[in-house]
Amino acid sequence: MPQRDRFLLIKAWGNGFWSDTAHVVGQLLIAELTDRIPVIYWGADSLYASERPLIKDAFTMYFLPVSNYTVDHLANENYTFYPSRWNRSNLRLPGTKDLADLEDAAIANVFSRSENVVVSNVHIFVHHLIKWIKEDHPAYGLGVWDVYSYLYKKYLKLQPYLSNEIEDFYLKNMKNKHPILGVHIRGSDKISEFPHLYQLNNSYPAEIDTYLKNNPTASIFLLTDSESILTKYQQLYGDKLIYTNCIRTQNDNVSVHAGLPYHDKKQKGIDVIKDSYLATKCDHFIGASYSNVSMAIQGLKVWPEGTIKLIQY
């Protein structure tokens, strides 16, 4: 049981949705291991910031709160803060990244802090934290992906309106079309990170065709942020293709989430959540090992052996 007056404030990492969510669950693990009460605040530093980012948290636009406390509870004049640049007056504001050193000594320093509030806005991957898990913890002895699954299952509870929207789409568009192969293909600005993205993406049709050869009545649920990729797969697979009406980019050099500022930020988050959770309703899934979306889908469901493949970059 976390001790009263010991908190971990988890601010936005400021990247794509599932990257920021992976940051959150890593910090939630730290909160468990350090007996701190977690409080999440996605403000103006989030790509999915609310319409009032200095007042309204964006994380709880999508998920239920992870504790009974909010950032308001932390603005206590008697509390101490770490790093020292944080104080009761600036907790809602964006800030430079802290705690960026992932060496063991730096992580140990976080574990040993005595301040009332530790603030984190930097992604510490779960694999950096495995060695700190003690025998009495539920995740002790688990592999990295099993730890992610434990954290996702425990903490990521969708807001009811989102659960209902996902279920409604499934019942209307997917329920009677099994078996379904989920396919996630990333376009847009990812090419700047992975120069061979197009070659990798070109390998998907062969994977899909093999699946359809063995499952000729199957449908394909496509997740993509690219209008051009959607058009290509409509031409390839016609009525077999299922997809949501999400925000996509028509320019594969522009990110849906960091770009397209004229689109509603909340809706961008809804779109990626909806696609990801619908993918977990598929019988099989093909994604990419470099993609936070594909990796989230891997962690959100216990996939039977042989039903999920993340293509290696």
Image: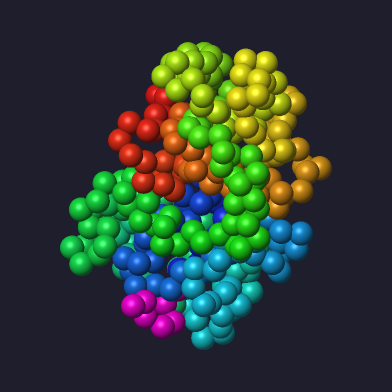
Q: Is residue 280 above or below residue 91?
A: above
Tell me where residue 221 sits by quadrant.
Answer: top right
Residue 281 in the image: state x and y as whole percent: 49, 43
Question: Which residue extends farthest right?
Answer: 262
Residue closer to the observer: 262 or 93: 262
Q: Is residue 138 above or below residue 306?
A: below
Residue 197 in the image: state x and y as whole percent: 53, 20
Tell me where residue 198 sits by quadrant.
Answer: top right
Residue 298 is left or right of residue 192, and the answer is: left
Residue closer to the observer: 159 or 3: 159
Can see residue 224?
no
User: Which residue occupies 20% across, 67% down?
Assistant: 136
Q: Is residue 90 above or below residue 293?
A: below
Question: Which residue extends farthest left?
Answer: 135
Q: How is the image coloured?
A: rainbow
For the record, the magenta segment spans 1-7
User: Which residue occupies 40% across, 24% down?
Assistant: 312
Residue 18 lies within the magenta run: no
Residue closer to the observer: 154 or 10: 154
Tell me where residue 231 sits by quadrant.
Answer: top right
Image quarter where the N terminus lies is bottom left
Can see residue 282?
yes
